[in-house]
Amino acid sequence: MRKLLLLAIVISLGCNAQELGLLVDTESRTYLIGEPIEVSTRIHNRTTRTFTPRRGNEAAHLSITVMRGESRSHVEPHGRELHLADIDLPSSEVWQGQVEITRLFNLRNEGRYLIRLIAVHDGMRYESFPRTVEIVAGFEITKVEQVFPGNPPHQRELRLSYWIRNQMEELFLQVTEKPETRQWRTYSLGPLIRTTAPKIDIAPDGLLTIVHRATPDVFIKSEIRSDDNEVAFLGQERLVDPVASSSKRMAPFQAMAVEDAIKKRDEKKKRSWWPF
């Protein structure tokens, strides 16, 4: 019986040594509609042969799959054949990579999705454990609309919304075309404090300016170009709130003044008890 147990352990270790270790991960578990989703991939070649996936090679292939969590149906990629990378991974080595899956799959519908890394090595198929992500609409704060002439004219909605991520509220700009003939990405504008409502303004030339409070004494101004042909993020600028920042700078001096007043009061009390 002991020999059979040892034999089973050896066989199990041998089987484990002949596997590809696959891992897929994302920075967050929740994303807003249109937000880019970066997926980190990791492959550990525990086999005895080099893993050399190539496009069009059915015996050595590297891809990723996405399934809808509710229906378990596959989300079809934009291209017919999805191949992540041509790599040469020797035995016992590790390869790491990143891919923006929102460029490969249409993930603009709310719901839960399961992401898996798939590898074919020497005709054997390997799968990673699924990574689950949730696509949400976000909580709307305010929005503006653009109308572009044409036949027929089309309308663009620029929507500010927020979501709680890592125990912090984060501000997003979502762009939607009506009718939705084109799809635009969602931009993260950074941390948000909603005690001051964000302000959004759009100029006649399509320059979108958004100002929101990021910390108690700092605002962030974001600029986005939105014209008929493109939506482009131009940059951000930090603006210091003069009221909050000045009161913050004066706090140490105010504390010193209070301490000085208390000290003078105590000294006066001591002198009042002096008999001469």
Image (cartoon, rainbow, N blue to C red):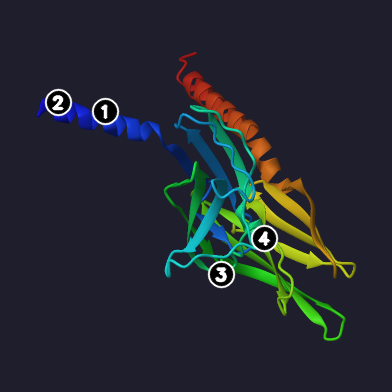
Q: CA distance from mark 4 to mark 2?
A: 61 Å
> To which residue does mark 4 refer?
186
Alpha carbon separation for disc pair 1 and 2: 11 Å
Which numbered disc covers residue 3?
A: 2
Q: Position of residue 226 (x, y in %)?
A: 82, 65
Q: Nearer the viewer, residue 17 or 3?
A: 3
**Marks 3 and 4: which is nearer the front?**
3
- Which mark's residue is nearer the viewer, 2 or 3? 2
Q: Does 212 sit left or right of 52 as displayed?
A: right
| Residue type marked 4 | Thr
Provide residue 110's location: percent of width, then percent of height. 53, 68
Crowd around label 1: few <14 · some 14–19 · many ≥20 (10 Å): few
Question: Measured along the vertical axis of the image, is residue 214 above or below residue 66?
Answer: above
**Image quadrant containing the N terminus:** top left
Of the numbered discs 1 and 2, the one sitting upstream in the chain is: 2
**Of marks 1 and 4, the one in the foreground:** 1
Mark 3 or mark 1: whose residue is earlier in sequence? 1
| C-alpha distance separating marks 3 and 1 | 48 Å
